[in-house]
Amino acid sequence: MSNQFSDRSLVIKLIFLVIGAIFVIRLSFLQVFTDKYRIKGDDQALRNITQYPPRGLIYDRNGKLLVYNEAVYDLMVIPRMCKGMDTVYFCEMLGIDREEFDQKLNKARKYSPYAASPFMKQISKEEYARWQSKLWKFPGFYISQRTLRIYDRPIAAHVLGYVGEVNEKDIENNPYYKRGDYIGKSGLELSYEELLRGTKGKKVMQVDVHNREIGSYQNGAFDSVPIEGLNLYTTIDAELQQYAEELMANKRGCVIAIEPSTGEVLTLVSAPCYDPNLLVGRARGSNYNKLSEDIAKPLFNRAIQAQYPPGSIFKIAQAMTALQLGVISPGTGFPCDKSKIGCHNHPSASCVQEAIKMSCNPYFYYTYRRIIQQEKYKNIYKDSQYGLTVWNNYMHRFGFGERLGLDIPNVRRGNIPDTAYYNHWYGKERWAFSTIYSNSIGQGEVEVVPLQMANLACIVANRGYYYTPHLLRYYGPDSAVVDSFMVKHETGIEKQYFEIAARGMYDVVHAPGGTAHRAKIDDIAVCGKTGTAENKGIDHSVFVCFAPKDDPKIAVAVYVENSGAGGVFAAPIASLVIEKYLRREVKRVDMEKQYREMAPCQSLPLKYRPAKKSKRR
Amino acid sequence: MALEKKKYDWWTIGLYLMIVLFGWFNIYAAVYNEAHTSIFDFSVQHGKQIIWMGIAFFLALLITVVEPRVFSNTAYIIYGVVLMLLVVVLFIGQTTNGGQSWINFGSFKFQPSEFAKFGTALALSKYMSGIGIEIKDMRTKIIAFTILLIPAALVLLQHDTGSALVFASFIFPLYREGLPGTILVLGVAAILLFVLTLVMNKFILLGILLVLCLFYLFVWLNKRNSRTYWITAIFFICCAGFVMSVDFAFNNILEPHQQERIDVLLGKEVDMSGAGYNVNQAKIAIGSGGFLGKGWCDGTITKADFVPEQETDFIFCTVGEEWGFFGSTLLVVAYICLLVRLVTLAERQRSTFSRFYGYSVASILFMHIFINIGMVLGLLPVIGIPLPFFSYGGSSLLAFTILLFIFIRQDADRNSLL
């Protein structure tokens, strides 16, 4: 029994315990004190696949499809994982060179080495099929399916807008968006982005050592199903829109048609137009640059962004205001005194209706003077200040100087000067009626957006109220509506006065001495008002109208830049639009042909269209 | 004899059963896939392991009815048979993963090296328990080392480095029997020096050694005579020789894959898709488990087969990933408890044979656990060696069970064994 060494059992036990302790400490460093390995593990074994919901479709008011989706495939990359692959073969398959490969990979790596970013966007179905079988050779790469917007008809680009990839700011503003996502950039696509886009889904897949998917992670506990975007049913009448765009070929300006009883915008054209399909797919960038650099400014939506002097159409609002204020009566007459303000040759107007028909400048000079100088104050400056404030208030009731709540972005408010405005320019009590009388005939400081002109036509058509012009009728499977579009906006002016305006506007088109005979349509009672906005170059031609007179179905505003008097250019175009809408066909073929071909502005393209029809369509 | 009540150590048996069962669950998870969910699917590893467990339990039961003296009496015969098998395997052995260590036995494969450890343990115990055998004697030392070096060399010839290393574990029972402790210390020092030579400049290392020697001589020692000078000088020359030969040994004795594995461990090589792949994936699997693990059969790395050999040598990854820090620590603690318990049992033996054998069992198990878990945790170079009772594999489970239960049988009869 050599038990002299039995103490050595303690040494041996101690060695065992120390090794055990080392293991536990090492384990704690690997498992508890760092999540480096957890991240690495999830990185290589899990793949987050974003499932894009189909974006909502857009229809016109008659159920015609305007915008739909088509599947495209993006080649995605997780930079950290692409190692040990045959780069030469990869580049060959993609048809890129090594330099481009490195550049793309570096860009992706700069965004995030861990997260997926698009390597090559929108590869075709054929390419997709080719890639699918080879993909396992390239760790870190996979294909993600998404949809592309296709515009069924090449119309209404300014209304529909376009979608584009999110930029850094979008990502910053809304964490919903990740790099490579698409977002509405303008038009309805932007306004109703949240309805249209739906909700992205997520699928977490387990991948094995060969980069193949081997099943869902934890039976899909972290997955979410994508929720489809909602369909939009717009107020646009596709046929009318297309017709109006054709009429506006070779011209600069806009056409707006509204259903007065609802405020639904039937047509909204800004010329020059472009095919919305230009801003789809890989070619979007270059096409966008081309459009934005064009001096005709096709991207500029004149219907809502241009602020023009309204010209004579503004006189209707002046007459209505004066009547409501009681400063004139329906039978008030003023002499056509050209010493005050220039006018064309016509007999003096003996009543409001005649004044509108003849568009007598001096008549409205006097009318405006009575509004501005109501003789409430002795001091002429104070009196003008008071009058201007009252007037400003009335103009706002007509929607002038207000941002009308049209449901596409960048609607401008125009300018209705107030006392502060003139005080700023001339100094307090340094201005009076004599300084600002040009406003009476829609010149001077007044600026109006074409949409507001169409709205004015609606107000007269409705005899005193309007609904906010809007482009969305209803949306989604429940046909939901936007409440604010159902609100009636009253001008607070009596209906009988508008009746006078309507009669005057009827005379403009139908009575001898009216300024817009070319707008006449057989057996449709068109009421209209011409305008000729003075301009540095050739005058702008303006026309607002509605029809039929006693049961208005459509109100139209047409603005054609640099084309001369309102009756010559804008009125016939407006009447063609009315005829097209009310009859669904135009009988005045010659006139139609004539105005389609007229080109007041030289060297404008007929329409911006894609160079070639896209292969995918 | 039959009337005497046998006192089996149920602590040891309990720990053994716990580890085996836990092992089976992890083998199931490691090879788990949706196509083979049935527990009793004998075409896959976890099904086969059930058969092996049945055989192992049967053998354990068989050993308890065998007279314990049988083992000490047949120790040399068993040793001889094992040596024969080790020679045979060199000629008819099948090569698996670079190691030529398998004998085909019908449809089952059989690995003699697993049994060599237990044969050697028996033979060495038998020799050391001989009358008048003292480890102090040079003759005893030579014979004892010969007994363990012959099988070690044969195993090394099969390119089974791991199993060969296990024979070094006999240093513990020999130490317990009186082998000078300096051998343990020198062994550790030699390993340390080896590693340091690989990671740093040889001449700087020698410089440091020289400074240490001079410090020992002129500062540490109060009295100096010619003998201390000579000893220090010889020590330094030996060290220098060792250091200078490390490179040679590293480049010429070690095989390329072994060199790579050591380089990986020392952080010299960072090729994560090549030599470093296993260790890196093992670390990811374990580290991703976190504190409580991902849950049984829910390990993403395990399921995706990122870690090769996961049901055998890298089985600990499954524990780490699916049971987390909690489960891994529990397993480590279970192993250490088993080892400490075995040492305690060995110490209470009355016969030298039983005691030496007990220490051998504890040491062999320890060496396996140390190398296997150390490798999986990235603390040691990759050396293929199973985790006792835990890894998939019939030979290793049977061999370890026999090894352990012979000792449990001895322990139960310790009062009648002298």
Image (cartoon, coloured by chain):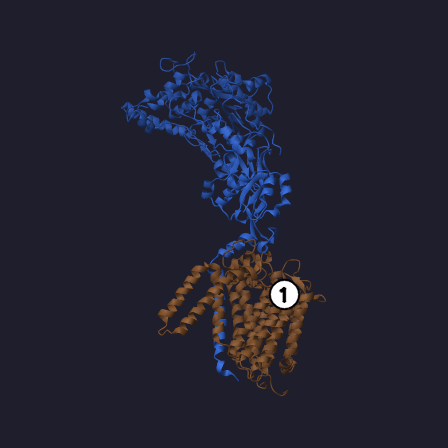
Chain colours: A blue, B brown
Q: Residues within 10 Å of mark 1 (few under 14, many from 20)?
A: many
Q: What is the x, y in percent for residue B120? A: 60, 74
Q: Examine the rendered structure and indicate whether residue A222 appears above or below residue A563.
A: below
Figure quadrant of the N terminus of chain B: bottom right
State the residue in front, A40 or B202. Answer: B202
State the residue in front, A608 or B199. Answer: B199
How many dots with numbers? 1
Seen from this angle, which residue lies furthest right? B106
According to the picture, the residue beneath numbered tag 1 turns out to be B158
On screen, residue A183 versus residue A402, left or right, reads right
Figure quadrant of the C terminus of chain B: bottom right
**Marked residue chain, label 1:** B
Residue A139, visible in the rendered structure? yes
State the residue in front, B262 or B65. Answer: B262
Residue B22, visible in the rendered structure? no
On screen, residue A149 versus residue A362, left or right, reads right
Seen from this angle, which residue lies furthest left? A379
Q: What is the x, y in percent for residue A414? A: 41, 28
Dot 1: element? loop
Q: What is the x, y in percent for residue A324? A: 40, 26
State the residue in front, A249 or A594. Answer: A249
Q: What is the x, y in percent for residue B64? A: 63, 80
For the residue marked with disc 1, what is the amino acid?
Gln
Q: Residue at x 43, y 62 (%)?
A: B206
Seen from this angle, which residue lies furthest front? B226
**Which quarter of the figure has residue A447?**
top left
